[in-house]
Image (cartoon, grey):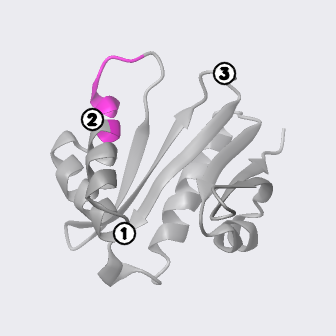
Amino acid sequence: MLQQGDIEKCSKIVCQNYSKKYEKTSFLEMEAMFKNHTVKPQYIVAEEKGEIVGFAGYIQSWMDYNIYNIFWVNVDQSHQRKGIGSALVEKIIKTIEKKKANMILLTTSKPKFYSKRFNFKTLSKFNENKYDLMFLRLKK
């Protein structure tokens, strides 16, 4: 699990993969895990030799408590293509399944990754087809 002291390292990974703007956004969103909210995000981290090399978050939907969202799946660029992102998503899916949820939603620019590895399906494309809104129906 993400510790409050890990937020800066994780937001730096976001900066590597996106931009300074998203570094700040992700920092604020990760801080919400440690605040008193009714529904708050949870983050898991991947470590190698005690160093964070990746992380991912999830949250229960405010509109329907049987739906969860996965977000900020990020791996340090020097550790990509080693299965870290897959392991993070797999762990989150298993965690959400234990909560008896019906569905998982996510937005991605890499739909093939999620469809091939985890059987997510595209609901819609947006932002000039750069992103897919995807879902995974969980077994009940």
Check disc 1 and report the residue beneath it: 17
- Label 3 sits on residue: 63
Q: Residues under labels 3 and 1: Cα distance? A: 30 Å
Q: Residue furthest right?
A: 140
Q: Is residue 43 left or right of residue 93?
A: left
- Which residue is the extreme one toward the left? 5
What residue is shown at x 71% (from left), y 33% (from top)? 100
- Please indicate whether residue 49 sits to the left or right of residue 32 in the image: left
In-image side of 111 versus 95 (left or right): right
- Single out the residue that lies furthest toward the front: 128
Q: Which residues are magenta?
A: 29-37
Residue occupying image coordinates x 66% and y 61%:
128
Residue in the image at 56% along x and 47% along y: 70
Label 2, label 3: how many angstroms apart (C-alpha)?
22 Å
Residue annotated with mark 2: 31
Q: Secondary structure at mark 1?
A: helix
Amino acid at the residue labelled 1: Asn
Of pointers 3 and 1, the one earlier in the residue sequence: 1
Does the image show residue 2?
no
Kindly indicate whether the residue at mark 3 contacts the one at mark 2 (C-beta within 8 angstroms). Answer: no
Q: Is residue 16 above or below residue 128?
A: below
Amino acid marked by disc 3: Met
- Residue 51 appearing in the image: yes
Q: Quadrant of the C terminus?
A: top right
Q: Tell me residue 104's x, y (percent).
A: 68, 44
